[in-house]
Image (cartoon, coloured by chain):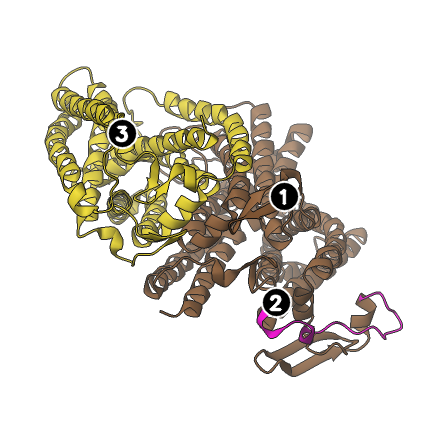
Chain colours: A yellow, B brown
Amino acid sequence: MHASDVWMIFITLALVMYVVLDGYDLGIGVFTLVERDDRSRHEMHTLVARAWDGNESWIVLLAVAAFGGLPLAFGVASPAVYIPLILMLFALIWRGISIEVLDQYPTWRRGWGRAFGLGSLVAALCQGAAFGGLVAGVKTNGATFAGGPFSFLHGGYAILTALTATALYMLAGAAWMYLKFDGDLQRGIGRAGRSLTIVLAVAVAACWALLPAAGTTTPVATGPVRLPVWIIGAAVLAGGLAVAYRSFGRHPDRGPVYGALAIYAGGLLLLLGLLYPHVVPPNITVHEAASPAGSLNFLLIGVGLCMPAIFAYNTYAYWVFRGKLRLPKEVVQP
Amino acid sequence: MSQSALVELSRWQWALTASFHMTFPAVTVGTSVFLIVCYGAYLRTKQAVYLRMFRFWRRIFGIGFALGVVSGIVLTFEFGLNWGRFAHDVGPIVGPIVGMEVVTAFFLEAAFLGLLIYGDGRVSQRVMFLSACMVCLGTILSVTWILAANSWMQTPAGYVLTNGQFQPANWWHVIFNPSFGWRVAHMLTGVLVSAAYMIAGISAWYLIKDRHLDVARRGLSIAIGSAAILLPVQMYLGDTVAVQYIEKYQMPKLEALEGNWTSTNTGWNAFIIPDQPAAKNDLTMTIPWLGSAIANDWTGRTPTPGLLLTSPALRPNVLTTFYGFRVMFYASLVMFAAAMMGVVLRLRGRLYAARWFHRLVLVALPMGVLAIIGGWVLAETGRQPWIVYGKLLTADAVSPLHTWPVVGSLSLFVVVYGSLVGAYIYYVVRVVRQGPEGAEDPDAGRVMVPPRPAVAGRREAR
């Protein structure tokens, strides 16, 4: 196995960790925009406040892993999605500050709460748009990006993926909240989760069906491995959607989380089956984009040695807060 | 679309976001050392005042730390967003170094910052002390890795060029490139000095206001004492950086920072108004003899080399290089003088009584940060037109973007970062007004929320 493939696995891991972890807290952020009850919103804020910054450290790791390991891809893909990525950065800053202010100044809760929700929504939409812009193909000229500021839109395809990503994150947020909350709030989320599952199923199907129309440059499905990977991926994805739909509103409370994880896994398989070995379709493969072995080995050793500690720390963070969310009695409600 | 406008805009965006980011590490690294000192003193002497100091400075540390992290994320993405060609060409070298910074420093800080800030009553004193040490180690590692990456761009070594891409040939030579050692020492001393002046300045303000005298006196004494030791060292390191790397490897930077065009000036320019296109200064104020003396010729006959030695296309911007250096140098002189006066006052037993001195230290509060930003302006603009010195032109490193998205993002950064600076100053002033007594009870004056995770690092102290 090539060092660049090993590094690709690592980058995929960082991407999955980011999307799974920050996905649910962005989704909860979007939920706060539609939640009318003050107390419920406060519980949602608390759930996010405990975890968001640890979750976001994975996107930094993702960025430097691409910079150091796949410099060609990083240098071509980033300018191709300049507008959504810049907006996403501002949204993440904005959202991080809002949640901290919410935590400290309970009197300003309404305005900052809305700011937090909007920041989460913009970040989710931008990530989806950037994803769509990249998957549908990037116009390149050798080692440079050759498109315009809006070519990431691909005739509106990026808008579809933006909405899909938001629905996915909201579903993940609903699944996490279903696990962490109880009572009326949990029942309400269960109902919302069911509707979201249907929306997401339609959205994913649309993304898949419309991709050939949007990405004239997408690699053609060839090779003996692709079709089985697609079939397995689609089966896992469909299974995840079914599990999520069935278990929202039922016991055990962790059912929707399993459903969401299966949706992520199926989606990832479909994506890899679609793109691999391309990292920036249609022209750049992981082997072309990869740094030379000297850089990859340095990264694999240095980063590899640190990963166990990073995983231990993240696991501990979630273990400390296992079980249902419990707010102390002293919380003052405005 | 004008290519040079795009390069200028991208450079401005980088300059703005990097300077904003740099402001926070400039004080948090040194403050984390001070936290170790305070908590260590508390563990040894069991005097409550040291615990009060620890808790007070910890709050100011936490705020700056959070902003430093958030603004650092932006820089990581800008490597690709605005400098895509740079990302491709130097990714195999700079990328792994920055990657090591993330996995060693970033995650170490994240893990222990939570314990440091929210660990009161939940962890033992020993673990608290360990956390302070680990956070400090993280900040120092961070500075070291970043300086390794930047020094490689100043004095590239240990690479081979393959198809326009810099690839590592010898990691030892890459990391320990010719300018790295002196520059990292210079930078680490610089951040310690700027933290010392922030601590001294806030302590001096309390002395002027006659408040929290026990905390203020100890703070002023430790900070001025450290500055008095560090500043002579820093002057020596700065001079060595100039001689060992600028003069040896980047002559045009030296010519620009001294602000001479012809190579005839034996004096030292204190103030100039340069006219870059005409290759002359409209106004020059020179201190005679000094330039030659700095070049170690005490007879006053050695002239300083001028920019006419460098071809016009390869000349750095004199205005920014000259004044970047002057801001750093003049601020250091003020801090040096203040530290020496502080030592004299201390020996005469008047350090805590001399009001005029406290006012001087209060004025000197931001000088360390100014010196660091000035020094970086010198290092970065003095390297131009190169992004990797002598090898890769900045104009060839920029992403092929349209101008207006960059105008848009730059304007947004101006607005957002402007308000964040405002919020930071507002918050620090608030914490200082509240004083160390307010820090006594970490839960005072706010809504009770559940215990935060020991690991939810990198957030504002509350």
* Residue corresponding to mark 3: A223
Question: Gap in Å between the C-alphas at discs 3 and 1?
Answer: 41 Å
Q: Residue farthest to the front?
A: A223
Q: Where in the figure is residue B117, as x and y percent of width and height?
A: 49, 34
Crowd rating for badge 2 (residues with CA inside 10 Å; few <14, some 14–19, many 20+) = many
Select label 3 or label 1 by which is in front. 3
**Residue interval drawn in magenta:** B295-315
Q: In percent of the image, x 25 and y 57: which residue is there?
A: A150
Q: Do labels 2 and 1 share a chain?
A: yes
Question: Gap in Å between the C-alphas at discs 2 and 1?
Answer: 26 Å
Residue B174, which numbered label? 1
User: Of B373 and B446, which appears nearest the observer?
Assistant: B373
Helix, strand or loop for disc 3: loop
Rendered position, A11 above or below A108 = above
Q: In percent of the image, x 61 and y 64: which residue is there?
A: B382
Q: How many marks?
A: 3
* Amino acid type, mark 2: Thr
Q: Is residue B317 left or right of residue B85?
A: right
Q: In this view, does A35 lie to the left or right of B21?
A: left
Q: Where in the figure is residue A273, as x and y percent of width and height?
A: 27, 30
Residue B321, which numbered label? 2
* Amino acid type, mark 1: Val
Q: Is residue A218 magenta?
A: no
Helix, strand or loop for disc 1: helix
Q: Where in the figure is residue A129, as x and y percent of width and height?
A: 25, 46
- Residue B31 visible in the current orientation: no
- Whichever of labels 2 and 1 marks the residue nearer the N terminus, that label is 1
Q: Assess whether mark 1 and mark 2 are in contact (beta carbons under 8 angstroms).
A: no
Image quadrant assignment for residue B240: bottom right
